[in-house]
Image (spheres, rainbow, N blue to C red):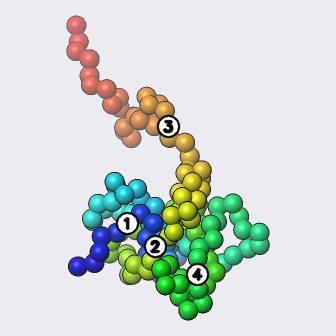
Amino acid sequence: MPPPLATGQIIWAEVADANGIRKLRPAVIVTPADRLTPGEPLDVVAITSRLTDPLPDDHVLRPWHPRRHPRRGLNRRCTAVCTWLTQVTDSDIQEVAGVVPAPVMREILARVAAALPPPAPPGSAGDAPPDGTSASPPTPEA
């Protein structure tokens, strides 16, 4: 039985790029630990080795080693792209490669949070059911 998945693990999974082309690539699990449920989708950020200089603000450099980093499993200079947030399922995961160091994980999570739109305030249109009906219970007629 494989070990349970955890926030901060580096996995290899099929992840689609911006053009929808799926490719086996590393990714970091960013789903909070209290929301990790077997069989449910996991939130991940993709890791890429296509780097620019300077790095964009949404990229976080990852530890690596040319002979494959012993704890991270990465063998080239690469970054976690914090705006490349997607979901994978258990069946998409080919391998668990390692774990992100805590200070780097905090930076990744902060940049993911900064990239997400703010949540809708309670009672806003974002809380309405998709069919446009009211989520409130019906009021009794007098």
Image position, residue 106 (x, y; %): 54, 58
Amino acid on which the number 3 mark rests in the picture: Ala
Which residue in the structure is indicated by mark 1? 6
Mark 2 and mark 4 lie on one chain; the one further toward the N terminus is 4
Disc 1 from disc 2: Cα separation: 9 Å
**Location of residue 104 in the rendering, given as x and y in whole percent from the top left corner:** 56, 65
Q: CA distance from mark 1 to mark 3?
A: 28 Å
Q: Quadrant of the N terminus?
A: bottom left
User: Is residue 19 visible in this depiction of the protein?
Assistant: no
**Marks 2 and 3: in contact by CB < 8 Å?**
no
> What residue is at 40 percent from the left and 68 percent from the top?
88
Q: Are marks 1 and 3 in contact (CB under 8 Å)?
A: no
Q: Could you tell me if residue 116 is visible in this image?
A: yes
The local crowd at label 3, few if under 14, some if 14 to 19, many if 20 or more residues have their Cα within 10 Å, is: few
Picture residue at 51% right of the left edge, 64% below the top: 102
Q: Earlier in the sequence, mark 4 or mark 3?
A: 4
Q: Position of residue 82 (x, y in %)?
A: 58, 62
Query: Label 4: few (<14), some or many (≥20) within 10 Å?
Result: some
Secondary structure state at the residue bearing disc 2: strand
Q: Is residue 17 left or right of residue 36?
A: right
* Residue topped by disc 2: 99
4 relative to 77 in the view: left or right: left
Q: Nearer the viewer, residue 18 or 55?
A: 55
Question: Label 3 belongs to which residue?
Answer: 120
Q: Residue at x 40, y 78 (%)?
A: 96
Q: Are marks 1 and 2 in contact (CB under 8 Å)?
A: yes
3D distance between C-alphas at marks 1 and 4: 20 Å
* Residue denoted by label 4: 64
Mark 1 or 4, nearer chain start: 1
Mark 3 and mark 2: Cα distance apart in space: 33 Å
The amino acid pointed to by label 4 is Trp
